[in-house]
Amino acid sequence: MDKLRTYRPNILVIGDVMLDHYLWGKCERISPEAPVQVVDIQKESTVLGGAGNVVNNLLSLGANVGVLSVVGQDENAEELVRMLEISGADVGGIVREVGRKTGKKSRVIASHQHVVRYDSESKEPISQTSIEALVSHYEKMLPHVDLVLLSDYGKGVLTEALTCHVIALARAKSKLILVDPKGDDYRKYAGATLVTPNKKEASLATKIAIVDDESLQKAGMLLKERLNLEYAVITLSEDGMALFGETFMKMPTVAREVYDVTGAGDTVLAALGYALACDLSIQEAASFANKAAAVVVGKLGSATVNFDEIEAYEHTFCRTSAQSKLKTKEQILRILAEQKHRTIVFTNGCFDILHVGHVKYLEVAKSFGDMLIVGLNSDASIQRLKGKSRPINPWEDRAYLLAGLESVSYVVLFEEDTPLELIAAIKPDILVKGADYEGKEVVGSDIAKEVRLVSFIEGKSTTKTIERIRNA
């Protein structure tokens, strides 16, 4: 995850941009005029939809994003382009077409339930003049991007001629090109790096009813071979995704709670593209995209995801690697900036030879809040405190063993004799120390909101462990 945070890839999104308009309210009665709900509208919001949601997800992850699309010359177009500009996207490739209606999907939602949706849009293919304008922009932008994403909502931008030209030129320039497809005929996507249909879309395109893993594997491999793709990905909503390369790999996932799968495909396309642009392997990229989608289906409406949400998901629902829990002070502060609603617990120590007393102490500490951060003394710090014979284990070993414990959320190394600077930066809600600090001053007690003391298990300590080894 840290590797992804340090990149800012340049990604080009081509497709149908639109507005997602929401009317939020509550319903407490049925209309006397007809058997329909009366929704009392309490707020209204508009976000980028379609390919615009792919753009938003990429920006949320930190990419530099260019957009190629066609809109009308109406108020919706003005609002859409303005929102893209404010979000930070490059809108130089947006083409205006006379007489075209910019897409806007309006949804009425009462108590988190969709009541009705009404659309205002053009669906016919864009004009030849618009195609030529897009091609001109594309040829200028392609050399400067790391990867191309096609987001096809079937609203007329990605015509067969344009799509084939875009894919051919990308491959000629050795650029990866990923497609979120639409319709039941995928021939225009032939030659792309990969496509990302959902299960229903893949069934329509392959004429294979996907009802089990066997039919899923058959449909995915058929897509890959028929379209001459390097890979195919079939998204399975809250059930994860399937990856088809040389072999078939199914990646299940667990969502906190599935509120809405709207836009999950956009998130998968964006996350896959971002990770591949950062030189991750296809398996690593698919795993990252799978986690991103799991976060998004737990939100209502078209939604975006960021690194901190994905990392929080990993710690809550996935078995994360110990390595991913090792953070610098700067990294942990970035994470905490997005976790202000969580109760942060901090403790520190040398943890030289990890034993059952440490494990139970940390389990108790974690029970006090949502996230346990362990400050770990560096080797030099321990030598100053305990003498040249310590530590027995170098900090890399000590940190990794601590990070392997389920109770530990993150491990942060500090070089000073005390963790005061680290505590001052983290500002934990609860500071935990051993019961032997009863009546003593606890470093950082004036910074944390609360200090709690936890009893150690009698007879369990690193010193006693060393003594037993020597005596043996």
Image (spheres, helix red, strand yellow):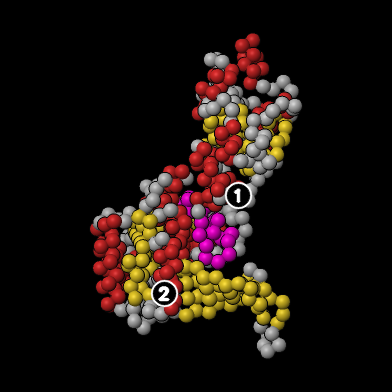
Amino acid at pointer 1: Lys
Residue at left offset 66%, top offset 36%: 446
Disc 2 element: helix
The answer to which quarter of the image holds residue 348 is top right
Camera-side residue of 139 and 265: 139
User: Do the residues bearing badges 2 and 1 touch, measured as CB atoms within 8 Å?
Assistant: no
Residue 78 appears left or right of 433: left
Secondary element type, mark 1: loop
Q: Residue at x 72, y 76 (%)?
A: 28
- Asked whether residue 290 is drawn in magenta, I would say yes
Say which label, 2 or 1, has the lower sequence index: 2
Image side of residue 24 versus residue 199, left or right: right
Question: What residue does disc 2 label?
Answer: 78
Label ID, residue 340: 1
Q: In this view, does 332 lie above or below 149?
A: above
Note whether 420 is above or below 336 in the view shown: above
Left/right of residue 63 with respect to residue 390 in the rendered view: left
Horizontal and vertical percent for residue 320?
54, 42
**Which residue range is magenta in the image?**
286-305
Mark 1 crowdedness (10 Å alpha carbons): few <14, some 14-19, many ≥20: few
In the rendered image, residue 284 lying in the magenta stretch gets the answer: no
Q: Which residue is drawn at 32% across and 66% down?
A: 92
Q: Residue type at mark 2: give it.
A: Glu
| Location of the C terminus (image quadrant) | top right
